[in-house]
Amino acid sequence: MTAPSQLRLLTLNVNENKDSTIFRLEKGWTLHFVLGPSLADKDVRIFVNHPTDPKLGPNRSAYHELKWENLSAQKSDVYDNFAEVRLVMAGSFNYYFTINKSDNVEDANGRGYFLVDPILRVGKMDDRISMDCIRCQSVLPKSLGTFDKWKDRLLVSKESGYNMIHFTPVQELGISNSSYCLKDQLKLNHNFSTKEKQYTMKDLEELITMMKNEWDVLSLTDLVFNHTANESPWILEHPECGYNMINSPHLKPAYLLDRILWHFSLEVGEGKWQSQGVPPSITQDDHFNNARRLLSEQILPKYRIAEYYQVHVDDTINRFKAAVLGGVRGDDRPDADIAIISDPSYRRLKSSVDVALAIKKFYSSQPSHISRDDRIVEACNSLRQKLNELNQAAENTIAGHIDCAVNNFLANGRWRFIDPNGPKIPKVSEKEPIMWNYFTLPNKKMTVEEEEEMMDSPDGAFCMAHNGWVMSDDPLRNFAAPGSNIYLRRELIPWGDNVKLRYGDGPEDCPFLWDFMAKYAKETAKIFHGIRLDNCHSTPINVAEYMLDEARKVRPDLYVIAELFTNSEYADNTFINRLGLNSLVREGLNAWNSHELGRLVHRFGGSPVGSFMQPPARPLMPSMAHAMFIDQTHDNESPIQKRSAYDLLPSSALIAMACCATGSNRGYDELVPHYIDVVKEKRLYKSWSTDPQKTGRGQVDTTTALIAAKRAINKLHHELGKSGFEQIYVDQVNDNIVSVTRHNPVSHQSIILVAHTAFSQPHNMDGSNQPPLVIPGVLDEIIFEAKMQHVTKVAPYKEDSDFINGLPDFTVTMKEHIKVNESSMVQMAGTDKLNFVDFPPGSAVAVRVSLTPPIRASLLQVRQLLAQFGYRMRTFSARNLEEIKGGEIEVAIARLTLNDLNRILFRCDNEEKDDGKDIGAYFIPNYGPMLYCGLQGIVSILSKIRASNDLGHPLCDNLRMGDWLMHYTAHRLMVHESTKEIGKWLKMAFGHLSQAPRSLIPCYFDAIITGVFNIAEEVCWAKMSEFVKNGSTFVRALAYASVQLVSYVRTAKLPRLAATLAPPAPPTIEENGQKIVACVSMSAGLPFFSAGLFRNWGRDTFIALRGLLLITGRYDEARLIILGYGGCLRHGLIPNLLGEGISARFNCRDAVWFWLECIKDYCKMRPGGVSILKDKVARLYPTDDAQLTNNVEQTLEDVMQEALQKHATGVSFRERNAGHGLDSQMKNEGFFNRVAVDWETGFIVGGNEFNCGTWMDKMGSSEKAGNKGIPATPRNGAAVELVGLCASIVKWLGELFDLKKFPYDGVRKNLGGGSVRVITYKQWAQMIASNFENHFWVSRTKTPNEVNSHLINRRGIYKDTAGSTVSPWTDYQLRPNFPIAITVAPDIVNPERAWFALNMAEEILLGPLGMKTLDPSDWSYNGYYNNDEDSANYNTSKGFNYHQGPEWVWPVGFFLRAKLKIASLLEPKHPGIFDETANSVKHTLTAHREHIFNSDWRGLPELTNKDGEYCPPSCQTQAWSAGCILEVLYDMELLSGKNVKK
């Protein structure tokens, strides 16, 4: 598969609802859904409604299932599964996924939306413009005059530099003439026609097309779905389309209240209540207080509105009695209570109660010995009391609503009549009531009583609710629906010229309305390129969805904007997602000062200057809504009124610098000093004059007000969006001056605008002595400079009677595209400062700045070097399948060995210092030392700060301040011959980069480092096995530890190898003029086991070796490590601490068995691997008592046989140099070691109470606590894992002997008296197999012959040891060791028992990342390890509980492998158990995957504390942790194939 140009990855997680999260994408991109950790073991089905073919069109209900794909060769590994969507259509699309195999959206476990932006095109050639290039101007069509004059008036917008015109509705308007009160949604406003011609929508379409093709101007208009004019012919023909008294009877009480208040207002206007203190001319607050008294005490009580919510008590009692007598049974709901049920028709006193429930409460509950008649009487009395209570409660509730209604009624009146900020209407009248009505008025004058009667007549269908605005209401709630009291409480600000439309839940609820409005939407979309969804927040969202879908069927790339006033980001995002809104209108006038305006400019788009370069394939991040940032909307008051005339130029210039769409309102550029009323304005816009000398009264030209400046500003905004100036920096210079920089990250050209705002009338117009502007490069030109000036000789403003006119006494002086010396506002001071000599309030200047030629040349060199990397940025599901193409750096890295790559990528502080080059880890001020000296140390930091674009991170500060890190990175590689070429390349690259502006250093440094790092990573994997090379990202991440932890370290060499060793020869290096062997060794973990004596541990090495070296295909390195350790064999053991063989300690019983198991794995996994048995081993100690020897060589098979024979015979010895010099913690008895075979069982036995010879080897060291010299876990006797390992080895050797590939048939057992007996390996294996269950299985129930029952804490498990002589109860402790035996020797256990025991271990021991080392119910358990604790606590002091609870990671590997192997054995008997187990394993490993990808060490830790808590003393990357988990994935793949075949 070819990698797409832009790829985004969206991670899915269990129970994740993303309906309110915005994800923005573009057509032509690809979206990949990937599985989060919580879904790794789930059967996930994912569905989307994005069409596969754009010809299919949008259909929200047409979901199709996506297919899961995986580029990994391991089909059992789901961690890189992805489902792909090629984005071919713009709009809003939904996805959902299930985990129960269902395809039903109702079963969705997770869901969300993704938005695909439309592609907008202009001109005859359909040139594409981005949404960030939009410059939109709003116009009122009614102010354009007759249609034949539109072109001349619209030309003003085009010549002012706008490329989109927003028309408020163009359709037939209602009587109010409000631009948003439509009478006929399908008909062009007749006022646009002339006597000569009747213009239609067809004429409008032709004009819109001409504007797009010839002017490069797009068009946008409003869709109004909420309401229609009161006098719309179709609403009178189809009254069901409104909320009326027939289809919405719940509104009857509100309608009655509305009529009462309307009549009261009429009576006030007629003077009826003047004697009561409420005159027609309301001038003071007392008038309203008197009105409240009248309404509350005299008028409203007589209408008894509460009766619409009350029951008729006597009627209800009668129905109750009849029901009892009729044998109706009582309702048996125990928690239900009697409540009033509203009458569906909302008639007075027609509400009811649940009679069956009343029978249960008041009749059935009475004692049975009472007569039926008496019971009925008693029940009726009780019910009557309850009904009276309910009626009273209803009355109280309604009284509260009415009181609120009166308050709102009078509050509105106060604003209209006496508020200084209101219209201050002089007199109450029918045309100017106290408050406008909520419902349409009757056609004739009627009394309140007559109007109440009309509600219940057929004419009630024409009593319709007006639409309006509810402050702070839930926008997703229909305020006219049943259950809402908005109309009753009069919390609506009504629009009395229109009717609120009632759609219902779908087209079937009101077919005519849905069909009519769909035609309206499609007709609009056919003509216009975009729409503004009017009153979006209160448009029923299901209606808007449907209508926009219909519109997009006509125009798939429809541009949709809206204003939202929800006061909730959640609600905003819900609207954006469900409707596919492309831009939200944002108002510049919301800024209260220049600082806030600058903040908004920064907030609405763009990334910071110097931002990191993001790869084309990356995670899909949530985004905020795209903005259309408008200096003045058509609903705003004039900024001249709100601020000052001087501010229009600088604020508009600042808004134009935002990385988003911008807009304005017709009148702003002409300095109209008042609000152009969408309802009342009757004047016309002026038209365009092509000759300023002949401009007439009704015309404007380039010299008018702001027009020339706005054209320059709009032109600049277009260039910024089109030419890639996507980075932004806003500087608040002082209280009034704001500087905005837009930067192009490719050309590194910057455009800087400085604006001197005037949010209030300026008192000081002195433009000198302003702070200078630092120029970061060469000032190419002044793009424009402009300032607003007041002309005193011109007559002041007077409103024109025919045309909308602006201030005549303000003008703008400006210059465009000039050199600095031509400026009248600024001058250069030296080479890098621009002084402002005349920059008063109302000024703006924009300059273009380029880098100096030398810097440009240096950055060109850097970019050419980066071109070698291409798009080699790896992501979770966008795998890099590119081959090495031959670039200089690629070829150089490809030549390196994995040991060299260890130096390139890793090496912790001690490893680096060990090289003797006086180099250690780099220290970042205010951060600390890097974890690795190599590239991984840098990338671990960069990968996090790049994702969040954290340019303020200390690493970025360090890079901006100096070249130290660049020098360090190159120098540490140059001092080594094998990596010198890479170091020189980096030095050259950084040399060029160091010439760049310091603000750009971090992003280019990141690009260089990441590019080299990614190549090095790919080369690492390319040098490994096919399993790794073609593996998942998880497999590769685990295999990465092979490079991380396996390298040559001078102070931790392997022992001497045989001089006659067969090829391939070990690697060598030149040191001090001599060629020396430089074999890699394996660190047990970092950072604590990095160099010197404590780097190489035999046990750790061979537990990790299969995973880190054999599975990864590093057979040569594995061979040398096996042979090197084999050369140290002594007493039948290999060393625990290697010490290059010279300082070796032979104090562990288990390392030799893990060594032998690795030899077995090597022979089986490497083609021809059995030849290693004939390899020569240089024996350092050919006999147990020999001194260090240089000239004895043996074959590996002889050394192996010696180890086994020593165990068969039995070995007992005291460590050489025993004493405090060797081990300061151990008691004298602990230096005595014993290993042997118990020939009754075949088990390996050994140890004593003073030493700990297995991996649980913590020796007490606290004198204060009294545990010094006492092993916490001696595990003497037969340790379960050693028995399993021995069984595995001897069985294999028996098979090899039969194949004549191993020369020894078994071992010799000393019978005493000089006689011996041969025990063949087959016999030994059979001996173990026949005894294992009897000695290690703890029965699930007590058996008759059971011994030590009192010591058993857990049943259904395998013992940890058998035959412990220290403390017999320790045999029965539940620990994570028995799964090791099951993994390596599954044939020695009963599969059913093993399965039960493994499930017990899972339930009790398995933690998030590791396995508890002891059963939490054990008295010795403590899950928190702290080696620094020196307390009196015996169990924890000095970390005594190291293996008594803390959760170790590597045993998880053996545990999961054991489960897989046993499940495979059980599959024939229990079909499906293997797949179920594999899914469980995948789920368990998700934590490890997450950890390794999120870890700065890029590894798995040694251990964690209880329940996965971080353990500070733990190594954060441990060899056996990564190696053992990698083995799980490898074995799962092998076993999956095996079980599929079955």
Image: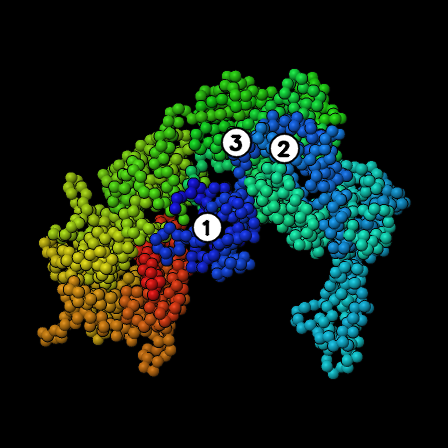
**Residue 413 visible in the displayed image:** yes
Depicted 865 relative to depicted 80: above or below: above
Q: Which amino acid, by three-letter code, is at mark 2?
A: Glu
Q: Which of marks 1 and 2 is in front?
A: 2
Asked whether the residues under the numbered discs 1 and 2 touch, taking CB atoms below 8 Å apart as contact, a structural biologist would say: no
Q: Where is residue 264 in the image (x, y as percent from the top left)?
A: 84, 47
Is 1359 situated left or right of 708 in this image? left
Q: Position of residue 107 (x, y in %)?
A: 53, 59
Q: Distance between the residues labelled 2 and 3?
A: 17 Å
Element class at badge 3: loop
Q: The disc labelled 3 sits on which kind of residue?
A: Met
Badge 1: residue crowd in 10 Å (few <14, some 14–19, many ≥20): many
Q: Which of the labelled discs sits on residue 1451, or is there none?
A: none
Question: If the image is split into quadrants, where does the C terminus sit?
Answer: bottom left
Residue identifier under label 3: 125
Identify the mark nearer the N-term, 1 or 2.
1
Identified at 65% across, 46% down, the residue is: 518
Q: How crowded is mark 2: few (under 14 residues within 10 Å), some or many (20 or more)?
A: few
Q: Mark 1 points at which residue?
A: 33
In three-dimensional space, the C-alpha distance between marks 1 and 2, rounded to whole angstroms, equals 43 Å
Q: Residue at x 69, y 41 (%)?
A: 186
Of marks 2 and 3, which one's residue comes earlier in the chain? 3
In the rendering, which numbered label is found on residue 206? 2
Question: With respect to residue 910, does 326 lie above or below?
Answer: below
- The residue lying toward the viewer, choosing from 153 and 396, is 153
* Amino acid type indicated by mark 1: Phe
Left or right? Give the position of 362 relative to 449: left
